[in-house]
Every structure is written in C-alpha cells, then in structure tokens.
Image (cartoon, grey):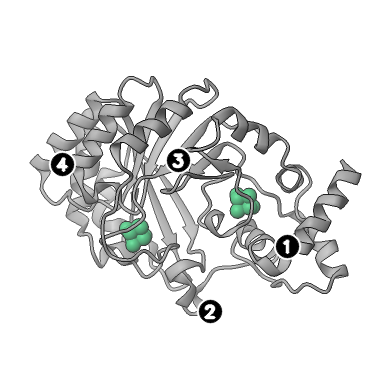
Amino acid sequence: MNYNSCAIEVNKKCILSCAHCCQDYKYGYEYISFSYFKKMIDEICKCDRIKAICLTGGEPFSNTDILIKYFEILANTGRYLTLVTSGLRANNYEFTYSLLIKLNKLGLKMITISVDEFHYKFVKSQNLINLLKVCNKLNIKSEVQIAIINSSNLSENINPIKKYLARSNIRVFPVYPIGRASIIQKEEIINYNLYDNLKCGKGYSFEIEYDGSVNPCCSPYAKYIDLHLGNIYHDSIFKIFKNLENHLILLYLRNKGFRPFIKIAESKGIAYPDRVTSSCELCYYLFSDNKYLDYILSLNDYLTKEK
Ligand code: SF4
Ligand code: SF4
C-alpha cells in the first residue's frame, strides 16, 4: 500500500441536493472550524509520505471566503493541493478568475469538476465553462468526473463544455447506489458480476471526514464501512499509518481480493448480492452492518492464522 495523499471533507452539509449524491446531506454549510482545520493539517504534515491534499465536501465552494482561509492555512505546507467542486459559485467569469488566481497563488494545482445530468439541475454549463477557461488560463490542471446511470446520455452532458476540455482528464464512473442515490431505480444502476477478480484497488489515499474520522479510501462507501483507521484529532498520523499497515482485512482485500471473505460469508449463510457496481459495494455488504460484527471478528481470527 503506497499511501501518498489524503482527501479532507471540509463540510458535512451541501446546499445542493443532487439525486445521485452518495451522501444524504441536509441543507446547509457547517464547515470545519479554522482551529480544527489547522490542527488537522499540522498533524498530517508531520508525515512526509503525504505529498498531496485534496479538499472535498459537501461542496467546498459553498463559502468561498472560508475556502480561501483554508488555503491560507495550507499555503506553506509544500503539498500538492487540489479540490473537488460542482462549479457552484462560478457563474461569473470575473469572480471565478479572481477566486482561482488567489487559490492558485496559495498553492492550488488541480481542480476536479463534477459534470452530469444530476449536477446540471443546479449548476449551469456556463459555470463549468468559466472554471475550465480559468484553469486553462492559469495552468491549473483540471479533471472532469462524470457519474452515469444506464439512461445517461454522455454526449449530452459533455457537449456544452467540449470546446474547453482539450487539456482535461475525463473520468466516467457508475453512480453508486448509496446515500440519496439508494432510491434511484435498480434498473438504472450499472452493475456487473466479477467476484472472482474483485480486489480493492484504492491503496493510495486516506479520506478524513468532517469529524476527523480517517477512512482507508475515498470511496463513497467508506463512511458506511467498519474499516476506520482512527481519528486525526486524537491519533497521530504515524499511529494511523500503523493501524493501516496492521489492518489484516485491508491487506487481504488489496493483495488477495474478496475470495476468502466470500467463502466465509457463504459458510456462515451470510447473504450478498450477485451483481455489484464495484468492489466497494461488495465491501459495504460484507463490512458495514453491526450484525456482521461476529463475522468480522471471526475473519480476524482466520486472517491472523493465514497471515
Ligand atoms: S453530489 Fe456533491 S454537490 Fe451534489 S448534493 Fe452531493 S455533495 Fe452536494
Ligand atoms: S474495496 Fe473497500 S476498502 Fe477498497 S476502496 Fe472500496 S470501499 Fe475502500
């Protein structure tokens, strides 16, 4: 596991309410306080292994004054700074330019922009164009992430912004049926069956939640899975790395895949779906529910013997 970055959920609420959201945020802002944010960043930066920090939410652009203050705290950390946004607040080119030039001077290197039919209900394509134009002008890298369901029309989503995408990475992924998205019709969710080859493929970035909980990945499922590594407000970053390196279940998921867990689930009569959207959804079925506590403990015994 080559962890070199972390994503920080700076607010636990969102002022949008996208139907495919993997959270079920209530309306509002509620940001991490500056003193807690500083405490968190100071702890993270004691560890040279973490080279990049990404701000996510919620929506980090909900309050751009607060966002600028976070970047002032991040400015001298020497880390590669990125953020994820829906493009909210970027409705005016001059405002977008003045915001991004400030953030860029404070160290912002890359922006990930969400583009899909769900966000388009709240954020106009002109906002995305403003963001992409300013990124191109200021040499800020951009990535466009597109969540899809079976009826999505990819070209319809991309067409309004395609002229500005030449320098962007594009990432397409299925909507995960969790959080608010759990009520999307089943037939709309893109899923498949490849249990034999499923492995956890995300061994490079922690996610730190609003309350300081540290998860071993940035998957939308991570919040709901009992694989937490500690809390950045109470545990040192070195203890969190130690917890990660000693985490038998994660080691197995990443090196050997899900097969041993499925075998035990079958022997215990534990139900799991025959098709999933991703390995993360299977992870969720196996490790999220309290009723699996005995099961998880028995896995630990089993894994310790097998180690
Ligand atoms: S998908 Fe992002 S922008 Fe939309 S409601 Fe969820 S957190 Fe907010
Ligand atoms: S498989 Fe589990 S541990 Fe791995 S990225 Fe997905 S949710 Fe995280």
Q: Nearer the viewer, mark 2 or mark 3?
A: 3
Residue 271 occupies quadrant:
bottom right
- On whether ligand 2 comes within 8 Å of the CB at mark 1, the answer is no
Q: Which residue is mark 1?
A: 293
Contact check, label 2 and label 1, Cβ < 8 Å: no
How far apart are the alpha carbons under marks 3 and 4? 23 Å
Contact check, label 2 and label 3, Cβ < 8 Å: no
- On whether ligand 2 comes within 8 Å of the CB at mark 3, the answer is no
Q: Secondary structure at mark 1?
A: helix
Q: Relative to residue 39, is residue 220 depicted above or below?
A: below
Residue 33 pos. (x, y %) = 30, 42
Contact check, label 3 and label 1, Cβ < 8 Å: no
Q: Ligand 1 falls in which quarter?
A: bottom left
Name the N-terminal-most of marks 3 and 4.
Answer: 3
Q: Nearer the viewer, mark 2 or mark 1?
A: 1
Q: Which residue is mark 3?
A: 7
Residue type, numbered disc 1: Leu
Residue drawn where x is 81% and y is 66% of the image:
265
Q: Nearer the viewer, mark 3 or mark 1?
A: 1
How far apart are the alpha carbons under marks 2 and 1? 31 Å
How far apart are the alpha carbons under marks 3 and 1? 28 Å
Quarter of the image that includes the C terminus: top right
Residue type, numbered disc 2: Glu
Which residue is nearer to you in this view: 55 or 240? Answer: 240
Name the N-terminal-most of marks 3 and 1.
Answer: 3
Q: Secondary structure at mark 2?
A: helix
Quarter of the image that includes the N terminus: top right
Residue drawn where x is 46% and y is 24% of the image:
45
Residue 218 pos. (x, y %) = 51, 47
How far apart are the alpha carbons under marks 4 and 1? 48 Å
How far apart are the alpha carbons under marks 2 and 3? 32 Å
